[in-house]
Amino acid sequence: MTDIEFNRGPAKSPKRDRPETSREVSPSVEAPPPPIVVEPDPELMPEEKEQARKKYLLRRFWISARGYWGRHGGRLAWPCSIGLLALIVINVGFQYGINVWNRQIFDAIEQRNAATVYFLSVVFLPLVFGSVVVVAAQVSLRMMIQRRWRSWLTNTVLARWLASGRYYQLNLIGGDHKNPEARISEDLRIATESPVDFIAGVMSAFLAASTFIVVLWTIGGALHLTVAGSTVTIPGFLVITAVLYAAITSSSMAVIGRNFVHVSEVKNQAEAEFRYTLTHVRENGESIALLGGEEEERSDLDKTFANVLRQWALLAGQHMRTTIVSQGSMLFAPVVPVLLCAPKFLEGSMTLGQVMQAASAFAIVQSAFGWLVDNYPRLADWNACARRVASLMVSLDGLERAEQSDALGRIRHGETDGDALLSLNDLSVSLNDGTAVVKETQVEVAPGERVLVAGESGSGKSTLVRAIAGLWPWGGGSVNFRPDRQLFMLPQRPYIPAGTLRRAVAYPGAADRWTLDQIKAALDKVGLGYLNDKLEEEAPWDQTLSGGEKQRLAFARLLLHNPDIIVLDEATSALDEKSQDKMMEMVIQELPKVTIVSVAHRAELEAFHSRKVTLERREGGARLVSDVDLVPHERRRPLLLRLMKNQQSLSKSSTSLPGSSGAD
C-alpha cells in the first residue's frame, strides 16, 4: 500500500518560509538536458565498459552542475569567481614579496647590517598582515561559492526529485539510485565543495609555479660541472631539478593511488547502505520490537557494518601508501635546493640570501607541482561522490524522458467531459517493463457518488489508486478530473510529518492555515479530542500514535481540507468495525456532497457506498468484471457491453455477467 497522501486542486496551502540557505539562490528548473547516449562497443571488456560508464556519469554531473554559472544560475556566481581569482593573484604577489624579503634579510644578516635587519623586521609586519587578510578573504569567498553552488544544485535536484511523484517512482524502477537522501545531502555537498577547492588550488599552484620558476631561473643561473676533464653546463638547474622532483613524486602517487577512486567509491556506497539499514530499523522499530526481531536485525547490521570496516581497511591501505610518498616529499623538498646551491655559495658566486630565497622558491614550486600529491585522496573522494549524484540524475532523466515518450505508454491526465467528476477512460496500468497490471478500465464517477472498489489481494486495486493520483505513470488510457475540483487521498498508512501535532493534523496544508479551535473541533469529531492539549508539542508523533490514531487523524485532515473527491485506500483497516462505521458516518454527515472512491476488503463498507466495482485478477492484467449499484442511481455504463465481448473472446467458460438491471 502507498503511504503517500495526495492533494490535488485549486486549494493551495500558504507558502511557508524557506530556510535562508535555500533562499540564497533561487534556481530556475530547466528541462532535463538531452540524453547522452552511451552505447559501448559490444567487443569492449567489462573493465572498459565500466570506465565508459564512469566517464559518462562525470559528464552528466557537469551538465547540471555548471548551470550555476549559466543564464539561470546564481546571480553572484561570476562576480564571486572573478573575485576569488583576483585574491589568488594578490596572494601570489604577497608570496613573492615575502620571498624577496627572505633574500634581503639573510643578506643583511650575512653582512651584519643591523639597520637593514631592523628595517626589514618592521617591513615584515605589513607583509604578513596583508597576506593573512588576503588568505582569509580568499577562504571566505571560496566557501561562499561552495555554499551558494551547493544551495543552487541541491534545490535543482530536489525540485526534480519531488516533481510528479518521482521520489516515489524511483522505488518502482531499476537503476543505481539507492539512498537518494544520502546522495542529495552528503554526496552532493562533497561534489560541490571539492571542485571549488581544486580549481582554486590549481590556479594558485599555476600562478605560484610560473612566478617562482622565473625566480629560480634568475637566481640559480647555470650550473657548471666538470666531468672527465670536460665542463658541462646545465642552464636553469634549479628549475630542472624542481620539475624532475615533482614528476617523480607525482608519478609515484599516480601509480600507488591508481585504485584510490574505486576504493573510495565502494567505501561511500557501503557507508550509505549502513545508514539506510539503521534508518530502516528506526522507522520500523515497533514492528521489530513486537516480533522480537532484534537478533535478526543485529545480524543484518553486523554484516553491513563489517562491509564498511572492510572497505575502510582497503582505504586505509591506500592512504598509508600515499602518505609515504607525500611525507617523504615534504621532508626532502627543503633540503634539495640548499644542497644544490651549496657549491655556488662556497665558491662565492651566490650569497646566503640568494640561497635562502632559492630554497624558499624551490619549496613553493615543489608545493605547486606536488598539488596532486597532496590532493589525490580528495580528488578520488570527489569522483566517487559526483558519480553517485550523477547516477540519481540519470534515473531522474529516465523518468522525465518516460513522461514525454510513448515507448512504454503513459497514462494521460486531463479534464472530464460532461457531468462526471472523475472518469477513467480505457485505463490500463502496467509496470515499467510493460507487464500489464490492470487492463481496459472504464469508470465514470458522478458528483456525490460513493464508489467501492473491491477485489482479492493482488488484483491491482492499490495500483489503480496510484494511477488515479498520478504516481504511477506507465500504462494507457486517461484519468480525468474536473479542473475546478480538489482531490484528497487517504492511504492505509497516513504520513505523519516531523514537528508539532498541529502540523501533523493540518498536513499537507500549513499549520497556521486553520485556527486552534478549528483543529480541535476536527479532532473531537474523529475521537481524538484527548490530544487537543498537545497540539503545540513537538514529538515523534509517527512513533507515538497507534495505527488507528493515525487513521483517525487522517480523517481529521479531511474535515479541515473539505475536498470535493476523496480516495480512500484501505483507510480504515486499522480501526475496529464500530470505529470504522463512526468514521464513515462522520464523513457522510460532515461532507454530504463529497464524492468518495474507496479501496477496501471489508464487506461492511458496502453500507456506506452507493456503488461497487470489482476487479478480478486475470492473465494479462486485472479486469473490471462487475459494476453494480448498491443504491439505485441512473447513469450510463458502456463498459460492460464491451467487456462482455472481450470475455467471450477470451474464454468460452467465463462466468456470465450479471443482468443489466443491476450490473450494467
Image (spheres, rainbow, N blue to C red):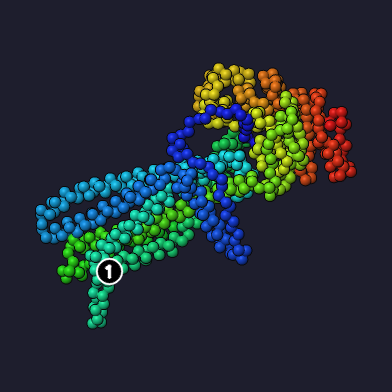
Q: Quadrant of residue 45?
A: bottom right
| Residue bearing the label numbered 1 | 236
Quarter of the image with the C terminus is top right
Tell me: residue 626, above or below residue 127. above
Q: Position of residue 318 (x, y in %)?
A: 44, 57
Q: Position of residue 120 (x, y in %)?
A: 16, 52
At 57% across and 19% down in the image, what residue appears? Answer: 518
At 84% across and 42% down in the image, what residue appears? Answer: 646
Frontmost residue, 419 versus 513: 419
Whether residue 629 is visible, yes or no, is yes
| 381 relative to 546 in the view: left or right | left
Q: Quadrant of residue 279?
A: top right
| 452 relative to 291 in the view: left or right | right
| 396 relative to 239 in the view: left or right | right
At 85% across and 45% down in the image, what residue appears? Answer: 650
Q: Position of residue 442 (x, y in %)?
A: 77, 36
Near mark 1 (Cα within 10 A), the count class, few <14, some 14-19 or many ≥20, is some
Amino acid type, callout 1:
Gly
Frontmost residue, 333 versus 284: 333
Q: Quadrant of residue 478?
A: top right
Mark 1 secondary-structure assignment: loop
At 50% across and 24% down in the image, what residue appears? Answer: 537
